[in-house]
């Protein structure tokens, strides 16, 4: 044994003074790759060097030029630790552990939600806390004197990565090799990266990046997950033990008397680190981790978002609720507001991080009226630190849209951008991100979700922009829903498939054009219901009392379309089924299948909307319109409806109808004859019946009818429905037709050319029949979607 130990020591190359490695000469019996230069260590029974501590492998010729630090000393080198935000443990494919340098698909592993750091659960004790430092502003910092440096991470490079220095391939699928900047994405060989410029310019995403130098976060003991608004996961643990401070009865074998004697004492068990070659001292983590105590002045007040409170209360009522939940007699906060009454949400401000932390810790476990509060500690943006040519992108993601696609997207965007500019709308809603960005004079929004999510974002923007520096930021879309009609018109596609590169999506946002979107107010006024009063005499018996008209009026902002009759009835039945079993409705294909099934049931067994044309009255711009024999009416702001269908049709406009766009101040009224025609329209095989076009719509009903606004259905009591142009404007981002990077956009997923057919019927406004139109029912250069899209109104 002594001789064997002597041989090992003889082959050992001690490089600890430089990079902490303990290299030993090793003969490789199978192919191996150098972690320094990425080249193969050629030949069977070839000699190389391997670190006893971290499994770093290299050629003998590379031994003296190694720049990668050993995992055993890396913890000691971090001057400003930034905690990682770990995912749930799983088997991660095609990645390597940043500690032991072995594959992560062989054992349970975790990854950081913010940066490209991967580690086995069993190696997590040695994980280096060097996540992206996303908030670096300090008091009295000036934009002209600040420099952003690269944040280099070793290994797990994207395929086809090229070295920025030597222009050669620098990625490897065989080992943890190569270096990449977490901010700009530049890649380089380990031997080349020190020749890179030290200053980082954020690369191709510079124009939409929220610079770390403009952000501050409270220096508190709150976990990074909460500061980043990320749903927390269990922290990785290499050993499963009971409470770290107290031992349970089954942790130690003791007699009953011993337990009885010790029950008044707290027993603490201390665990040493893992044993390894060259045994280390006890409490390894204590020795290898450096702690820096730096008292810095926070340059701002500390804002805390509180949600899930009752809606539409007075400010004093909200203050009483908060004081009760905080257990305080006097206000511990310096200010309250803004208050978002419609959503039961508000902002409270503290002047010290200690007070903010104490409030967050109390409120995050509080329950009011059987609802758990949503409590978030928010970052603060210093707008003067943002370069003038930068328009930061506010990313709002509905993680439940599109199955698990929302979760994958939000993780990718956090890694590509500053994580403090990416928000989960299910955790506080869009108002959280809009408040954080309130002082930025110019920025963009990327909403990731379905049509309902987009409408939610625009509605919250209407509320938040009153106190914001940017009144109307343009909004782009990543379509994660089922219909995605607004996204289709703006060329963002019919649905995110998961195959699109998130980096390309962000590049498209940078290159997108700004367009206007008309928005409309749909006012529902119920028919006045008379109620008899208590009779004291004959006159009182004949008198009626009316309800307050304001109590019978409601309003919804419409962005896409409105429907009454057969299409709203099918939509309502679908929503009822989805609400009853939401777990089944996770894919677009299944959702569309259910729509078709409900339509068939309506066709053969239920005709609840029969003779709608006799039972309602329609006025357009003050003129009463004679309706044809129809069972449904659709009022369009977009020429995309029901997952890309176009009820208006694509034939040449004639007569009194002008060419529709989503910014012309006009609505298109289309009739649907029956459920079979509805199916043909949704299958893109037919168009509806053009009825009218105008700037104001009024529908009078004398009985209950199913209605829907932007795909959200309900039963509307008898009364009047008025659609008027809203003063609330929206600016949208429209994807450029062709990428300036070269090549066309993903046209195959964006365009849906189809033939159109139509009935031989003239419209009530004297519009000639389309039967004689030689282009009707054909896709010609005059009526293709690409051609009409030049005006921004394409059915995509």
Image (spheres, rainbow, N blue to C red):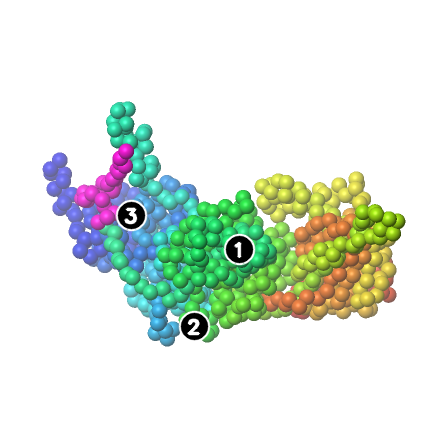
Q: Which mark is residue 384?
A: 2
Q: Nearer the viewer, mark 1 or mark 2?
A: 1
- Please give left or right for residue 391 compared with residue 645 in the image: left
Task: Name the image quarter holding the N terminus.
Answer: top left
Secondary structure category for the residue under label 1: helix
Question: Picture coordinates of residue 555 (x, y %)?
Answer: 69, 59
Return the residue found at the far top. 256
**Residue nearest the viewer, comparing 679 with 207:** 207
Which is more N-terminal, label 1 or label 3? 3
Evaluate whether residue 779 shows in this view. Answer: no
Q: Which mark is residue 126?
A: 3
Q: Residue at x 20, y 57 (%)?
A: 18
Gap between marks 1 and 2 measured at Cα: 33 Å
Question: Picture coordinates of residue 15 (x, y %)?
Answer: 18, 53
Secondary structure category for the residue under label 3: helix
Gap between marks 3 and 1 measured at Cα: 46 Å
What span is colored magenta in the figure? Answer: 264-287
């Amino acid at each position: 044994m002594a001789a064997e130990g002597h041989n090992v020591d003889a082959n050992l190359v001690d490089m600890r003074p430089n990079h902490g490695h303990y290299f030993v000469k090793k003969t490789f019996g199978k192919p191996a790759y150098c972690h320094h230069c990425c080249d193969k260590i050629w030949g069977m029974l070839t000699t190389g060097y391997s670190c006893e501590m971290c499994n770093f492998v290299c050629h003998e010729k590379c031994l003296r030029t190694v720049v990668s630090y050993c995992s055993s000393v890396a913890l000691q080198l971090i001057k400003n630790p930034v905690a990682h935000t770990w995912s749930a443990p799983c088997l991660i494919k095609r990645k390597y552990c940043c500690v032991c340098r072995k594959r992560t698909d062989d054992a349970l592993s975790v990854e950081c939600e913010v940066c490209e750091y991967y580690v086995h659960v069993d190696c997590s004790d040695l994980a280096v806390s060097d996540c992206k430092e996303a908030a670096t502003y300090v008091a009295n910092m000036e934009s002209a004197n600040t420099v952003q440096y690269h944040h280099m991470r070793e290994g797990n490079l994207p395929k086809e990565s090229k070295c920025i220095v030597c222009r050669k391939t620098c990625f490897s699928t065989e080992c943890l090799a190569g270096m990449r900047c977490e901010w700009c994405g530049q890649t380089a060989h380990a031997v080349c990266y020190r020749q890179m410029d030290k200053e980082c310019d954020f690369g191709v995403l510079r124009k939409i990046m929220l610079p770390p130098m403009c952000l501050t976060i409270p220096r508190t003991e709150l976990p990074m997950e909460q500061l980043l608004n990320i749903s927390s996961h269990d922290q990785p643990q290499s050993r499963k033990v009971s409470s770290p401070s107290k031992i349970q009865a089954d942790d130690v074998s003791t007699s009953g008397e011993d337990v009885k004697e010790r029950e008044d004492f707290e027993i603490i068990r201390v665990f040493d680190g893992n044993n390894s070659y060259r045994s280390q001292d006890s409490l390894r983590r204590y020795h290898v981790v450096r702690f820096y105590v730096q008292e810095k002045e926070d340059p701002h007040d500390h804002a805390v978002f509180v949600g899930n409170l009752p809606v539409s209360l007075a400010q004093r009522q909200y203050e009483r609720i908060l004081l009760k939940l905080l257990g305080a007699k006097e206000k511990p906060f310096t200010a309250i507001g803004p208050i978002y009454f419609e959503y039961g949400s508000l902002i409270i401000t503290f002047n010290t991080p200690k007070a903010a932390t104490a409030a967050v810790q109390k409120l995050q476990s509080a329950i009011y009226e059987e609802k758990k509060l949503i409590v978030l500690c928010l970052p603060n943006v210093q707008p003067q630190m943002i370069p003038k040519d930068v328009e930061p992108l506010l990313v709002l993601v509905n993680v439940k849209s599109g199955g698990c696609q929302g979760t994958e997207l939000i993780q990718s965007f956090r890694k590509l951008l500053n994580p403090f500019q990416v928000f989960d709308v299910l955790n506080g809603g869009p108002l959280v991100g809009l408040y954080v960005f309130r002082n930025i004079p110019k920025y963009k929004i990327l909403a990731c979700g379905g049509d309902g999510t987009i409408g939610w974002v625009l509605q919250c923007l209407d509320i938040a922009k009153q106190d914001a520096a940017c009144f109307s930021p343009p909004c782009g879309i990543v379509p994660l829903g089922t219909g995605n009609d607004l996204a289709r018109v703006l060329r963002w596609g019919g649905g995110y498939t998961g195959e699109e590169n998130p980096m390309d999506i962000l590049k498209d946002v940078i290159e997108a054009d700004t367009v206007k979107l008309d928005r409309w107010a749909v006012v529902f006024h119920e028919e006045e219901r008379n109620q008899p009063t208590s009779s004291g005499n004959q006159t009182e018996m004949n008198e009626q009392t009316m309800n307050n008209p304001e109590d019978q009026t409601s309003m919804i902002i419409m962005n896409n379309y409105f429907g009454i009759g057969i299409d709203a009835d099918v939509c309502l039945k679908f929503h009822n089924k989805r609400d009853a079993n939401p777990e089944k409705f996770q894919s677009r294909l299944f959702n569309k299948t259910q729509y078709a099934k409900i339509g068939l049931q309506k066709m053969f067994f239920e005709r609840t909307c029969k003779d709608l044309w006799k039972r309602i009255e329609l006025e357009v711009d003050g003129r009463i319109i004679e309706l044809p024999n129809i069972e449904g009416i659709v009022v369009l702001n977009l020429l995309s409806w029901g997952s890309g269908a176009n009820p208006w049709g694509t034939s040449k406009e004639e007569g009194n109808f002008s060419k529709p766009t989503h910014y012309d101040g006009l609505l298109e009224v289309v009739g649907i004859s029956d459920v079979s025609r509805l199916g043909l329209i949704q299958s893109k095989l037919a168009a509806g019946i053009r009825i009218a076009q105008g700037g104001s719509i009024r529908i009078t009903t004398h009985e209950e009818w199913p209605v829907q606004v932007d795909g959200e259905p309900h039963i509307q009591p008898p009364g009047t429905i008025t659609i008027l142009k809203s003063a609330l404007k929206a600016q949208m981002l429209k994807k450029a037709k062709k990428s300036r990077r070269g090549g066309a956009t993903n046209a195959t997923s964006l365009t849906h050319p189809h033939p159109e057919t139509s009935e031989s019927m003239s419209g009530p406004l004297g519009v000639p029949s389309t039967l004689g139109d030689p282009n009707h029912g054909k896709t010609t250069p005059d009526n293709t979607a690409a051609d009409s899209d030049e005006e921004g109104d394409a059915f995509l």
